[in-house]
Image (cartoon, helix red, strand yellow):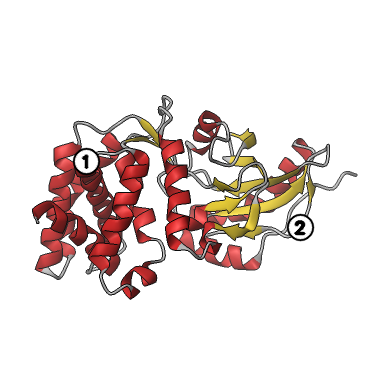
Amino acid sequence: MHSPTSIDVPEAFAASYGGQGAEARAWLAGLPRLGGDLLERWDLRPDGPAGHGMASLVLPVLRADGTPAALKLQQLREETAGAATGLRTWRGNGIVRLLDHDEESSSQLLERLDATRTLSSVADDARALRILAELLARLSSVPAPEGLRTLSGLAAAMLDRVPRAVPALRDPAEQRLVRTCASAVAELVGEPGDRLLHWDLHYDNVLAGEREPWLAIDPEPLAGDPGFELLPALHNRWAEVVATGDVERAVLRRFDLLTEALGLDRRRASGWTLGRVLQNALWDIEDGKIHLEPAQIAIAGALLGRATG
């Protein structure tokens, strides 16, 4: 009798992911069999231990012809639902290639990259930031396909939540900052843009490859203005920014490099970056926090200081 194939799920991943609720635990319970089914369907052989992040399990595999690949297993969620569509649209231009996709489970068969070498391994921060900026410019040069979530929808939803969320913050100055960020978004919401955005491009979401030296991974595709892409890059290696002793200057240096590389209007990019600060603030408040994250305050303050200076 044929025994169903299954995969091993690392205990650390199961322990961390299982704490995210009943749906997450149900997905974890079916993960060994799902992985085994996909190994059989796509004629794959495991080629090393699985790796994982916070939300996905990645198994190194070999295809039938011996080509290395990576099987990515992730729970189908709103933020990942458009990942395959985005990857197909980019066609490997600056980003990992999609080799196959199981729509029902949101699983992906991907080009194998070097998971041991992220862009964080580049010690020179200016060089790393230029690499990231060039990738952002390439990715956001592509028009977004139909069917993706839109920045206009996200922005409208954020603005609706602000009046209820702000009173949860203890500090009146932080309340004012959130309202200021909301005002910036309100000015731009009628012109949300139509580019294909990665939405989460930071140093650890860029891996070394053979086809190109560096390629982006883990997109959460969104249709919108590239200015909404900048905050993760501004927040990279925050301890080093603080260590400069002049946080505002360091933030603006990064911001100017990014906007120049992407060819963005700095006023609009500043407004959408404040929109990203607003989004993070709303998420933090929903998680029960009563103070904003210091780095977010500093980044917003640097951009607002330039605008009023």
| Residue 36 at x, y percent in the picture | 74, 47
| Residue 112 at x, y percent in the picture | 68, 46
The crowding category of the residue bearing disc 2, from other C-alpha atoms within 10 Å (few below 14, some 14 to 19, many at least 20), is few
Label 1 residue SS: helix
Q: Which label belongs to residue 253?
A: none
**Side (left or right) of 172 relative to 190:** left
Residue type (three-letter) at the residue carrying disc 1: Arg
Q: Residue at x 83, y 37 (%)?
A: 65
Residue type (three-letter) at the residue carrying disc 2: Gly
Q: Residue at x 64, y 50 (%)?
A: 30
| Residue 301 at x, y percent in the picture | 18, 61
| Badge 2 vs badge 1, beta-carbon distance below 8 Å | no
Which of 23/135 is in front?
Answer: 135
Q: Residue at x 36, y 40 (%)?
A: 262
Q: Quadrant of residue 98?
A: top right
Q: Which residue is mark 1?
A: 268
Residue found at the very far top of the displayed protein? 146
Quadrant including the C terminus:
bottom left
**Side (left or right) of 219 relative to 251:** right
Q: Which label belongs to residue 48?
A: 2
Q: Residue at x 33, y 29 (%)?
A: 194
| Residue 47 at x, y percent in the picture | 78, 53
The crowding category of the residue bearing disc 1, from other C-alpha atoms within 10 Å (few below 14, some 14 to 19, many at least 20), is some
Q: In front of the other: label 2 or label 1?
A: 1
